[in-house]
Image (cartoon, rainbow, N blue to C red):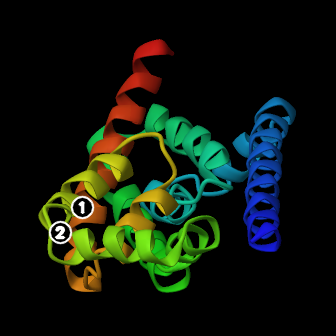
Amino acid sequence: MKRRVRKSTYALVEDIIFIIIGIAIAIFLTETGLLSLFLSSFNNYNIFASFFVGIFFTSVFTLAPASIALANIAAESSVPSVALWGALGAMCGDLILFFFIRDRFYVDIINVMKPSKVKKILHSFHFGFLKWLSPILGSIIIASPLPDELAISLLGMSKIKATVLMPIAFIGNYVGIYLLALFANFIS
């Protein structure tokens, strides 16, 4: 059992290190002006830039640089347009995450808990009240500054289909990016 817990602890430490690296990269790109240089290369292509950056708005590892980039794009174009195209990109990013990490949270739970408790938890996601609550929680998590991996794992545990995930991801990301862009325009 110790071996499984160590693997899970190592994965958590590894994820925290990647988050710190992502934040450091965001600060570096902003402070050196490289982010502004990159965004200026899209001059009149704010739609493409919003979509492209939106793809990176989904992962905990790229959330910080993507948030700063979306805020900068929103300062130069309309907030609804940035939110629309950024949300479409983020929805694509969430679909990529969905297909690659939807079962990761499940594996981490198995590594930490007893299999009988895991079965009870998973049973509630498939048949219990969490079956209808998980899409709502997933949408709230996607709209929040929390990483989308958490929502994708939650939705993956409830065995949600990709066709159901797409509108949830789009709406959640639209709200999140819209609020981010409004806040960025408000403080600037």
**Quadrant hosting residue 51:** bottom left
Q: Name the residue that disc number 2 marks.
A: 131
Q: Which is nearer the eye, 86 or 17?
A: 17
The amino acid marked with disc number 1 is Ser
Q: Is residue 88 positioned above or below 97 on the image?
A: above
Read off the residue under disc 1: 134
Q: Residue furthest top?
A: 187
Crowd around label 2: few <14 · some 14–19 · many ≥20 (10 Å): some
Residue 177 tag number = none
- Helix or strand or loop: what does disc 2 sit on? helix
Is residue 171 shown to the viewer in this render? yes
Give me the residue at 57% from left, 52% from top.
43
Mark 1–mark 2 distance (CA, rounded to whole Å): 6 Å
Residue at x-position 42% and y-position 67%: 152
Q: Residue at x 72, y 65 (%)?
A: 8
Q: Residue at x 38, y 65 (%)?
A: 154
**Quick one: 25 or 12, which is closer to the camera?**
12
In this rendering, the answer to whether 82 lies above or below 127 is: above
Residue 166 picture location, percent across and down? 27, 74
The kind of residue on which mark 2 rests is Lys
* Numbered circles on residues, count: 2
Q: In the displayed structure, does residue 159 sit left or right of residue 49?
A: left
Q: Nearer the viewer, residue 50 or 128?
A: 128
Q: Is residue 45 visible?
A: no
In the rendered structure, are the residues bearing label 1 and label 2 in contact, judged by CB atoms less than 8 Å apart?
A: yes
* Secondary-structure class at tag 1: helix
> Neighbour class for label 1 at 10 Å: few (<14), some, many (≥20)?
many
Residue 159 screen position, x and y as percent: 29, 82
Quarter of the view holding residue 53: bottom right
State the image coordinates of residue 175 (x, y, percent, origin top left): 27, 44
Q: Is residue 47 left or right of residue 100?
A: left
